[in-house]
């Protein structure tokens, strides 16, 4: 069984117009939402084997905040350059390349690509993955290479403003 959890990065700051897009940091709300959403994930009893992130500062910081809450090594977050401004095909390529020893992977990236990719995974449709939202799907496969062609099951969708 392989479980993929898509995580859109937490809310980022637009305060400094001179900062390039890839270097934008999280704002205060993002710094609050990321640990809260990691706690929700932890409460579901899902054990994450690997955190994978876009190289963008806001995605990496979101992944690090999740790692802290999930008692994972922040330095073990795998960075995949192609997850920055990724197309669904780039997401699928990143997923296909995951190590098969990892059964549950959380992947941190950006809109619009993450929403577009989410909508290719199951019949469940998401209009927009808000910042710091989580979408989880699973497939009864042994390898990540099989994930794309496998029958996948929607598990959950959650986001910070979702009434719990």
Image (spheres, rainbow, N blue to C red):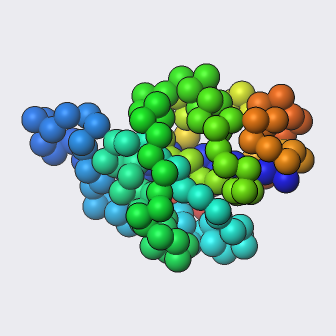
Residue drawn at (46%, 31%), measured in percent from left and top?
82
Res 134 seen here: no
Query: Which percent across, then down, holds residue 149?
Result: 83, 28
Judging depth in this view, the residue of 30 and 51 nearest the camera is: 51
Does residue 111 lie above or below 138 as drawn? above
Does residue 26 lie above or below 122 as drawn? below
Does residue 27 lie above or below 97 as drawn? below
Residue drawn at (38%, 52%), measured in percent from left and top?
60
Q: Quadrant of residue 70?
A: bottom right
Residue drawn at (69%, 56%), measured in percent from left and top?
102
Query: Which percent across, then down, holds residue 26?
Result: 30, 53
In the picture, the quarter occupied by the C terminus is bottom right
Residue drawn at (27%, 55%), measured in percent from left and top?
27
Query: Which percent across, then down, holds residue 5?
Result: 65, 51
Left or right placement of residue 74 versus residue 29 in this view:
right
Query: Which percent across, then down, holds residue 40?
Result: 60, 68
Q: For the image shown, how many numbered marks are present on the structure? A: 0
Left or right placement of residue 117 versus residue 84 in this view:
right
Res 102 seen here: yes
């Amino acid at each position: 069984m392989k479980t993929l959890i898509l995580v859109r990065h937490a809310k980022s700051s637009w305060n400094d117009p001179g900062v390039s897009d890839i270097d934008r940091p999280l704002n205060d709300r993002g710094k609050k939402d990321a640990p809260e959403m990691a706690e929700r994930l932890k409460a579901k009893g899902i054990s994450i084997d690997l955190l994978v992130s876009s190289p963008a500062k806001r995605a990496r910081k979101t992944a690090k905040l999740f790692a802290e809450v999930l008692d994972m090594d922040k330095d073990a977050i795998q960075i995949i350059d192609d997850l920055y401004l990724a197309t669904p095909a780039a997401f699928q390529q990143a997923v296909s390349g995951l190590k098969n020893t990892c059964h549950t992977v959380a992947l941190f990236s950006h809109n619009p690509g993450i929403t577009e990719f989410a909508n290719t995974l199951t019949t469940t449709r998401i209009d927009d993955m808000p910042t710091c939202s989580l979408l989880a799907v699973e497939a009864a496969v042994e390898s990540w290479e099989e994930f794309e062609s496998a029958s996948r099951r929607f598990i959950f969708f959650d986001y910070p403003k979702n009434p719990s």
